[in-house]
Image (cartoon, rainbow, N blue to C red):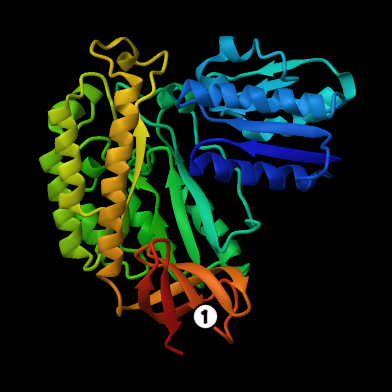
């Protein structure tokens, strides 16, 4: 039988979809090509914004029109956070949440036998454990994305994710290292650790992120370790020092910011100030020479004034981010910010989004152009022509490289050339 997936949201969702693809394919299903009808359509939903919920349901309706006899499945964060609302989604034959993912196969097989609608949304419990959904390969990727943490214990004013994901749950070290060894034997040289609140890894298992990074670097064949989004306040001095001793750790840090203005951060219920964020960046730069920083920023949060927005713009230039993902604040039912006073007009949000992204792009260009002539190591990721590949350096500089004699997935030393606004040219040194 043919199966098709549609994934919205973060890298964690994408990782989980990959694991589900493997689960179904190991049990007799095959992935439908984009031009093929499928027998089963599964949407792995994101509920960060109400727009994500709408997209999930629209995709399922389109799937039903394309193949009325197909099985349609709504799973992921949307049903988990809003089970009553999601259960009314008549376009879905099966509705499950972000818990008990492995049980989804049984639900689909059951529906194929009985054609009876299934709503199976198990609530998160305080003592839930990390759910294992291992992957042995990642089709189309030269970097291995691995989810090692789930859940979040924080309660930011704009965020509904704790309702969708539950409390912090960490993957057992032995399972991480075992899967890493399998991926390394399959030819992967770089692993990217991801999580809903990755910095919280180990809080429930008496370990920490720095320790698993150190152990992962000892797996034969793993040459690079890259970290997903991090909370700046959880990177204390000991953690930074321990990670700096791991030469395989990529010196690129995605530090969640959301705003460069402390009063705005306070309204968001973030637990650090702009100055504390600045201090963490300074410490990381001292421990990781040449480090780069990426981040996320929300503009137009309730109460954000022009002066506060200007502070964020100035902060972006001061820190010198390699890349900034700019989001306009979206009101989300079920969060404290939904009912906050002084909601910002949509047109103002759009204007601020445009201005900040323009500034961030200018900063990015300056940072990359300043690295012209540097010696780097490039992971050859996507072949685009004969002997030409796109790829990334350890610092996450995007590269176009002419590398005859090398193959996809290799890491090669190179010298950076000019930046064309999208990628740097690079020439291999061997």
Q: Is residue 205 left or right of residue 52?
A: left
The spot of residue 250 in percent (x, y) is: 35, 64
Asked if residue 272 can be seen in this view, the reply is no
Asked if residue 365 can be seen in this view, the reply is yes
Based on the displayed image, in which of its 4 quarters is residue 117 positioned?
Answer: top right
Q: Residue at x 33, y 48 (%)?
A: 208
Q: Residue at x 48, y 60 (%)?
A: 191
Which residue bears the numbered disc 1?
402
Q: Is residue 365 left or right of residue 47?
A: left
The spot of residue 411 in percent (x, y) is: 48, 76
Identify whether 328 is placed above or below 29: above
Of all residues, the one furthest to the bottom in this rendering is 430
Which is nearer the eye, 243 or 264? 264
Identify whether 140 is placed above or below 189: above
The spot of residue 371 in percent (x, y) is: 28, 72
Identify whether 256 is placed above or below 346: below
The spot of residue 359 in percent (x, y) is: 26, 47
Q: How many marks?
A: 1
Location of the N terminus (image quadrant)? top right
Mark 1 residue element: strand
Which is nearer the eye, 291 or 152? 291
Badge 1: few (under 14), some or many (20 or more) residues near its Cα, within 10 Å? many
Which is nearer the eye, 299 or 72? 299
Q: Residue at x 54, y 39 (%)?
A: 13
């Amino acid at each position: 039988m043919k199966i098709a997936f549609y994934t919205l949201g973060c890298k964690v969702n994408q990782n989980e979809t990959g694991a589900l693809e493997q689960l179904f394919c190991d049990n007799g299903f095959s992935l439908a090509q984009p031009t093929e009808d499928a027998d089963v359509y599964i949407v792995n939903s994101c509920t960060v914004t109400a727009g994500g919920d709408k997209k999930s349901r629209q995709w399922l309706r389109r799937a039903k029109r394309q193949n009325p006899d197909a099985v349609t499945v709504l799973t992921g964060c949307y049903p988990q956070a809003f089970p009553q609302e999601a259960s009314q989604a008549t376009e879905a034959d099966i509705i499950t949440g972000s818990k008990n993912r492995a049980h989804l196969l049984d639900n689909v097989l059951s529906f194929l036998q009985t054609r009876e609608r299934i709503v199976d949304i198990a609530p998160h419990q305080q003592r839930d454990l990390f759910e294992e959904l291992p992957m042995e390969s990642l089709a189309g990727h030269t970097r291995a994305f691995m989810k090692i943490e789930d859940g979040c214990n924080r309660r930011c004013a704009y965020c509904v994710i704790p309702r969708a994901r539950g409390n912090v749950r960490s993957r057992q070290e032995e399972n991480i290292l075992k899967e890493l060894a399998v991926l390394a034997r399959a030819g992967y040289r770089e692993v990217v650790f991801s999580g809903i609140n990755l910095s919280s890894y180990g809080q429930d298992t008496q370990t920490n992120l720095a320790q698993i990074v150190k152990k992962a670097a000892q797996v034969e064949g793993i040459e690079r370790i890259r970290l997903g989004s991090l909370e700046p306040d959880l990177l204390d001095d000991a953690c930074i020092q321990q990670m700096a001793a791991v030469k395989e750790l990529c010196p690129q840090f995605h530090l969640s910011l959301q705003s460069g203005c402390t009063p705005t951060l306070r309204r968001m219920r973030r637990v650090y100030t702009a100055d504390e964020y600045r201090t963490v960046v300074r410490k990381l730069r001292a421990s990781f020479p040449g480090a780069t920083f990426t981040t996320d920023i929300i503009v137009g949060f309730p109460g954000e004034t022009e002066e506060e927005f200007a502070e964020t713009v100035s902060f972006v230039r001061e820190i010198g981010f390699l890349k900034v993902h700019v989001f306009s604040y979206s009101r989300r039912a079920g969060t404290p910010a939904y009912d906050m006073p002084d909601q910002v007009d949509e047109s103002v949000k759009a204007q601020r989004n445009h201005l900040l992204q323009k500034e961030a792009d200018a900063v990015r260009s300056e940072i990359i152009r300043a690295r012209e002539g540097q010696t780097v190591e490039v992971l050859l990721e996507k072949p685009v022509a004969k002997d030409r590949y796109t790829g990334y350096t350890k610092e996450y500089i995007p590269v176009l490289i002419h590398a005859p004699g090398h193959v996809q997935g290799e890491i090669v030393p190179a010298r950076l050339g000019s930046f064309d606004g999208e990628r740097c040219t690079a020439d291999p040194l061997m």
